[in-house]
Amino acid sequence: METPDTNTEQSAGEQPSAGVVPPAGMPPAGAVSPEEQKLTVIMNIAVILLFFVSPLIGFLIATKDQPFLKEQSRLALNGTITYAIFLFASVVLNATVILSIIGIPLMGLALVLTLYGGIKGAIESSQGRFYRYPLSLNPVR
């Protein structure tokens, strides 16, 4: 006798959750206050212009009552620190004429990833989901 499992079925319009699984003690995806969502969207868009400054500010001003903002700004800060390392490495490689063939594409990759991460992070956080920037290390825990 088969019993239908209703927990594994998705409704027709529902998309599977993208991004990062919330860490222990964090609210589930979608259960975030509108104020936190607005702050994280602004922070992710500001990454495009201010680079790692906006996630750093978000990380420092987040209170214990704002776990989504704290975690999302940590993820954005990790991504932008990684991209800063990419940019520094590309400048060093561009200093030598022979290795600039590697440095120029690396610089372009860092800038494209920053732009993509900021836009995608804003979209995901507006829906209350965590987003980890692509190719990012994890220096801030």
Image (cartoon, rainbow, N blue to C red):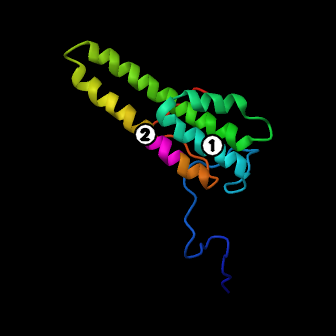
Q: Secondary structure at mark 1?
A: helix
Q: Secondary structure at mark 2?
A: helix
User: What is the number of the mark on residue 40?
Assistant: 1
Is-magenta flag for residue 91? Answer: no
- Within 10 Å of disc 1 (Cα), the crowding (few <14, some 14-19, many 20+) is many
Label the magenta part by its dominant secondary structure. Answer: helix
User: What is the number of the mark on residue 115?
Assistant: 2
Determine the CA span between mark 2 and mark 1.
16 Å
Q: Magenta residues, as a range? A: 116-121
Q: Kindly identify the residue that appears in the image at 29 percent across and 23 percent down.
A: 103
Q: Determine which quarter of the picture holds residue 100.
A: top left
Q: Is residue 113 left or right of residue 128?
A: left
Residue 53: % across, % down: 56, 27
> Which badge, 2 or 1, is on the more N-terminal residue?
1
Residue 78: % across, % down: 55, 31
Most distant residue in the right direction: 65
